[in-house]
Amino acid sequence: MVKLNLLLLFFVIGFAAVILRLFTIQVLNAKALPTDYLRTQRLHPERGKILDRNEHPLALNQTTYILF
């Protein structure tokens, strides 16, 4: 029973240390955090070409338009 209580105490102290560290980082040192984390950037990825063994294209990218 004593070992179980000691293990429980160890986990509670560890959990409290993690919570205290997170509080310190997010609340007390909030001005040190970057403010540009909400920046967005549009990416235009291009898919790879699918070729057969003779390097002839089987599937290529095509620009298409959809009307509703």
Image (cartoon, grey):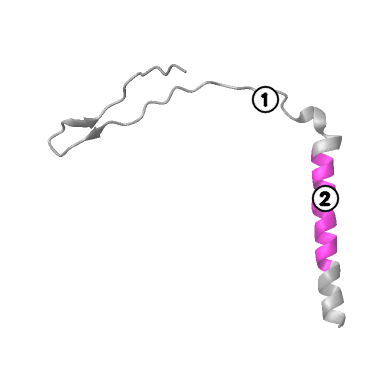
At a point 82% along the width and 67% down the height, the residue shown is: 10
Q: Nearer the viewer, residue 18 or 44?
A: 44
Q: Is residue 59 above or below residue 39?
A: below
Q: Is residue 14 above or below residue 41?
A: below
Disc 1 crowd, CA 10 A, few/some/many (<14, 14-19, 20+): few
- The reply, left or right, for residue 48 in relation to residue 51 is right
- The quarter of the picture where residue 52 lies is top left
Per the rendered image, the range of residues in magenta is 10-25
At a point 83% along the width and 80% down the height, the residue shown is: 3
Total numbered labels: 2
- The reply, left or right, for residue 30 in relation to residue 59 is right
Report the amino acid beneath label 2.
Ile
Task: Report helix, strand or loop for mark 2.
Answer: helix
- On the image, the x and y values in percent for residue 11 come to 80, 65
Of the two numbered discs 1 and 2 on the same chain, state the one appearing first in sequence: 2
Q: What residue is pinned by disc 2? A: 19
Whether residue 11 is in magenta: the answer is: yes
Q: In what quadrant of the picture does the N terminus appear?
A: bottom right
